[in-house]
Image (cartoon, rainbow, N blue to C red):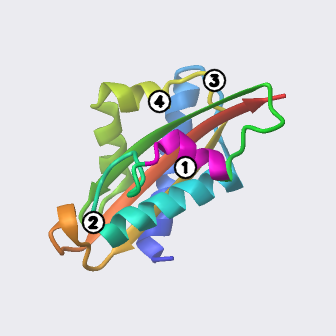
Amino acid sequence: MHAPARHLQVALLTQINAFRVAHRLVPLRVSTGLTAAAGAHSAQMARLGYFSHNSANGQSFSQRVAAAYPMRGFHSWSVGENLAWGGPNLAAVRAFRLWLSSPPHRANLLTARWREIGLRAVHATSAPGVYGGRPATIVTADFGARTR
C-alpha cells in the first residue's frame, strides 16, 4: 500500500473516532470485512475511473458490502458509506471536512448505531475517467452494525 494512503487511513480513523467521542458516541472498531469491502471499492473506482456508491456493474453499496460483511446469522444488520477523493496528497483533515460539510456524510459520522468501520484509501498515479488521467486518492469508509 502507498505509504501516504496508509497514513491517511490512520489519521482519518483517529479524527472520526475523536469526533464521535466528542458527540458522546462510541468509537468505531476496525472490521476486516468492512475494510475488505472499502478497499475493493476504492480500487475499482481508481481502476475504472468512476466515483459512485454503486459498483461499476450497478450493484448498490449495501449489496456490495454484504458480500464481505454478511447479514446471515444476525438479527439486525445495517451499513452506511462515505466517499471522498482528491489529489495525490489528500490529507485526512481535508477528507474529514468534506464529509462534515455534506449533511448525508455528516449523518453517517454521527449515526449512533454504527459499531464498526472499514476504511481504505487508494492512490492511483494516473486515474482514468472522472479523474482525468491525473493522480488521485480515493477513500471509501464503510460503516456497519450487526447484532445477534
Q: What separation in Å lies between label 4 and label 3 (alpha carbons)? A: 10 Å
- Residue farthest along the front direction in this orientation: 57
- Residue farthest along the left direction in this orientation: 132
Q: What separation in Å lies between label 1 and label 2 (alpha carbons)? A: 18 Å
Q: Secondary structure at mark 1?
A: helix
**Mark closer to the chain start, 1 or 3:** 1
Q: What separation in Å lies between label 2 and label 4 (alpha carbons)? A: 25 Å
Which quadrant, please, contains the C terminus? Answer: top right
| Quarter occupied by residue 107 | top left
Q: What separation in Å lies between label 3 and label 2 (alpha carbons)? A: 32 Å
Which residue is rendered at x = 57% and y = 55% of the image? 37
Q: What separation in Å lies between label 1 and label 3 (alpha carbons)? A: 20 Å
Q: Which residue is mark 4?
A: 108
> Badge 3 local density, few (<14 within 10 Å), some, or many (20+)?
some
Q: Which mark is residue 64?
A: 1
| Chain part drawn in magenta | 59-67
Per the picture, the main secondary structure of the magenta-coloured stretch is helix
Q: Which residue is mark 3?
A: 113
| Residue 120 in view of the camera | yes
Q: Is residue 143 above or below residue 46?
A: above
Q: Secondary structure at mark 4?
A: helix
Q: What separation in Å lies between label 1 and label 4 (alpha carbons)? A: 18 Å
Q: Which residue is mark 2?
A: 49
Q: Position of residue 30 (x, y in %)?
A: 66, 49
- Which residue occupies the foreground of this view, 52 or 111? 52
